[in-house]
Amino acid sequence: QVLKCEYAVRGEIVNIAQRLQQELQVKPDSKPFDEILYCNIGNPQSLGQLPITFFREVLALCDHPAILDKSETQGLFSADAIERAWQILDQIPGRATGAYSHSQGIKGLRDTIAAGIEARDGFSVDPNDIFLTDGASPAVHMMMQLLISSEKDGILCPIPQYPLYSASIALHGGSLVHFFMEHYLNTQESFYLLLAKSKGITVRALVVINPGNPTGQVLSEDNQREIVEFCKQEGLVLLADEVYQENIYVPEKKFHSFKKISRSMGYGENDVSLVSFQSVSKGYYGECGKRGGYMEVTGFGADIREQIYKVASVNLCSNISGQILASLVMSPPKVGDESYESYCAERDGILSSLARRAKTLEDAFNNLEGVSCNKAEGAMYLFPRISLPDKALKAAKVEKTAADAFYCQRLLNATGIVVVPGSGFGQVPGTWHFRCTILPQEEKIPAVVSRLSDFHKSFMEEFRD
Amino acid sequence: QVLKCEYAVRGEIVNIAQRLQQELQVKPDSKPFDEILYCNIGNPQSLGQLPITFFREVLALCDHPAILDKSETQGLFSADAIERAWQILDQIPGRATGAYSHSQGIKGLRDTIAAGIEARDGFSVDPNDIFLTDGASPAVHMMMQLLISSEKDGILCPIPQYPLYSASIALHGGSLVHFFMEHYLNTQESFYLLLAKSKGITVRALVVINPGNPTGQVLSEDNQREIVEFCKQEGLVLLADEVYQENIYVPEKKFHSFKKISRSMGYGENDVSLVSFQSVSKGYYGECGKRGGYMEVTGFGADIREQIYKVASVNLCSNISGQILASLVMSPPKVGDESYESYCAERDGILSSLARRAKTLEDAFNNLEGVSCNKAEGAMYLFPRISLPDKALKAAKVEKTAADAFYCQRLLNATGIVVVPGSGFGQVPGTWHFRCTILPQEEKIPAVVSRLSDFHKSFMEEFRD
């Protein structure tokens, strides 16, 4: 199972990039570029994005509560950060930020998160449905562990998908049942369910990533309702990856959680089994290193809930700083708080810059010969499709590489730009893509565009039939 | 696999305790005790142990580096904490404490940890052998995932064992091959290997917890050498749980890592496959909530190493605060540092208090009728054996409970003291034990002893044949 598992965003291309970076350090003039630009992974702070000040103030104070009532602290920290730290400490039994918590996470923090989801969706949330986790990845693994007992258990995933899903399904010995549909525009999934059945596979769950990774789509409400209806009718667990809920860049689209959609269709606890994943790694905060997140688990029987709890218990609990941060992102400063204005300025600055970067890159890709790029509605990625000349396909074959990996390695060696070949995510056979994050700092975007465009032109020239 | 998995330290007894605690909150006079005393889990800070100031200072500064060069900071933080925070930030690419790191953890922190292990053992360490993890539990799961592909793969564990191992082996679908031997005094393991083989099970690895959980033993060097030799001869991976390496309470015993023992026997990289687990949750620091730790992986081929790396990659990386803390516990303040004396006072205060608590509880247990308690040489637990009267065994049978669970539930209901039944760890059939931590605050120990002794007397009276 481990051998079968592949994880493209940290795969071969990243190893090559790290080698090039080491070579650059030793011999700065040895390459046609002076730095490696990591556009392979949604890791904003590694590319210079700064953390949100209020969040870090609260984390620092919770890490070292001994300074909370010192006078110097008031000069260093905002008043609402100090107040929030006190509130959080009071929610932790014995104010012990160094203790294991309840396996689902600190109850008071789950209350805060529940209130945040209620404010977002307008439907009630039970804090006991919240499981705090070290980011979304362990939460996904936990659910796969519960859903899969052998290769006869299938998980339905749209292709392209984020490799966390394929990797996790492989690790737990299940079958990934794919369907090719970039935008979930209709529910052809039934066909794939039947196909799976004919192979002896029982499909247990459907994965939906919204906003989408790698394709950046934001689903329409109609489409979301169709998906909920489909899961209800087929008795599938809906695994809703909603970690990009804050990352929407076009005014005509809005985020709606699947929980809200499901409840607004009149479906309650007993109608649809639904897991919503959230993470502190994405959004405008991008706190990947903190490993915080949660899943909201609804519509499961008490017996299954007990098993989810047991699996959560085996790792004792998620890290407390990550738990605190998850509560903060679901309950940021409010009007009237000392930090409110600076917080909004930081948040909006990041989100509007991301929107500009997304649009610039999207336009640039669409300007390249043989490249068509999806609209960057949300998330942190573009997934341009590239029509490669036959000569390039043949050259890739000679090197025993997938054609998109061949293109991406050429790009990396020529420009230092790291993108992930589409084959790591899955794509319609015979089509080629790559995934590029929108995260390089804004002042570097023009250089990314020109280096990438120059490379693409010379690549197309070299392999023109 | 999930159904099979059990995790006693967070099991049924804890659920009862939480219910009692809620009842106490509503009606403080409803029980014969006024608080629940959690002696079920090694979670020192939940029972009032304070964190080490220097560690928390550095963590806070790394969480909010913006204050590092403010003048107020010098009034609030020690000079060496500020210096260390700068050093750590300089080891993180872009000083980005909010970025995903290398899947094995930040290289500079691994260098620090490697140097700490070298100083401890006197043998060289390759920083590339270090994998930073969210505590020891995920590291153990990672190794079980790699070692187990079906129920034909066995892991040899001494009984009693810490339920993380039985739970993890069950979750990954392998077979726990046990042997009854509290102190690894001889290598009867061969017999159990043959027995497993006769059932079609191939034993892949041997688990050793040293200092021991739940039995608190510290292995002699001779015994450690026998274990290394046994693993070498049988070609077993040695999984060395060394998370209690700082917790030794008797002057005649010392901690020796299995790596040091193996190297001092002349065995190198190619002779023994060895994984050493360490955690920030134990020791004198007890930072359970931070979820930090590492494993040092030696003696595996490049192909296996690649697979370990892949499994680590699927969760991206462990949390950065936990990574920083793991580097700090392996490199605490040194002579001449501003914090050195206060650090030593904090550390020695905790360790000497733990030693006194261990001795007091050990003596108290040994004074009870029908109870014999192991010597508390190390770790955080006592594992007294209780001879229960036949009448009690029958009463347990009527309630369909294991006899030790029956005793522990009675104890909890009468005194509010939570201990874990020995059956959660495994024990020689027909014997009964419970595990009790040595962690209640020192001023509460007399009350623990008297409540427990009173309960035990009345229990024995009630069930006297």
Image (cartoon, coloured by chain):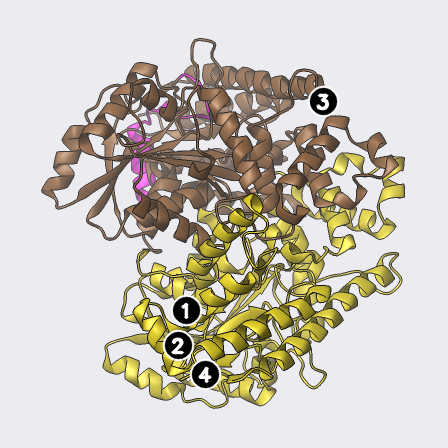
Chain colours: A brown, B yellow
Query: Which residue corresponds to mark 1?
Result: B406
Q: Amino acid at mark 3?
A: Ser
Query: Residue B392 bears which disc, if any?
Result: 2
Quadrant of the drawing holding the C terminus of chain A: top left
CB atoms of marks 2 and 4 within 8 Å: no
Secondary structure under tag 2 reads helix
Position of A183 relative to A410 (above/below): above
Indicate the amino acid at tag 2: Ala
* Residue A382 highlighted magenta (yes or no): yes
Q: Position of residue A162 (x, y in %)?
A: 38, 36
Residue A409: in sight, yes or no?
A: no
| Inter-mark Cα distance, 1 to 2 | 8 Å
A127 versus B103 height, above or below: above
Residue pointed to by mark 3: A339
- In the picture, the quarter occupied by the N terminus of chain A is bottom left
Q: Which residue is mark 4?
A: B387
**How many numbered discs?**
4
Q: Amino acid at mark 4?
A: Ser
In the image, what residue occupies the spot 40% across and 19% down? Answer: A256
Q: Are marks 4 and 3 in contact (CB under 8 Å)?
A: no
Is residue B55 among the parts visible in the rendering? Answer: yes
Badge 1: how crowded within 10 Å, few (<14), some, or many (20+)?
some
User: Which chain is home to disc 2?
Assistant: B
Tell me which label, 4 or 1, sits earlier in the chain: 4
In the rendered structure, the answer to whether residue A230 lies left or right of residue A286 reads left
Q: Given contact means CB atoms under 8 Å apart, are the residues at marks 2 and 3 in contact?
A: no
Q: Tell me, yes or no, whether dots 1 and 3 are on the same chain.
A: no
Report the front residue among A312 and B131. Answer: A312
What is the span of residues highlighted in magenta in the rendered image? A375-401
Distance, label 1 to label 3, CA atoms, is: 54 Å
Q: CA distance from mark 2 to mark 4?
A: 10 Å
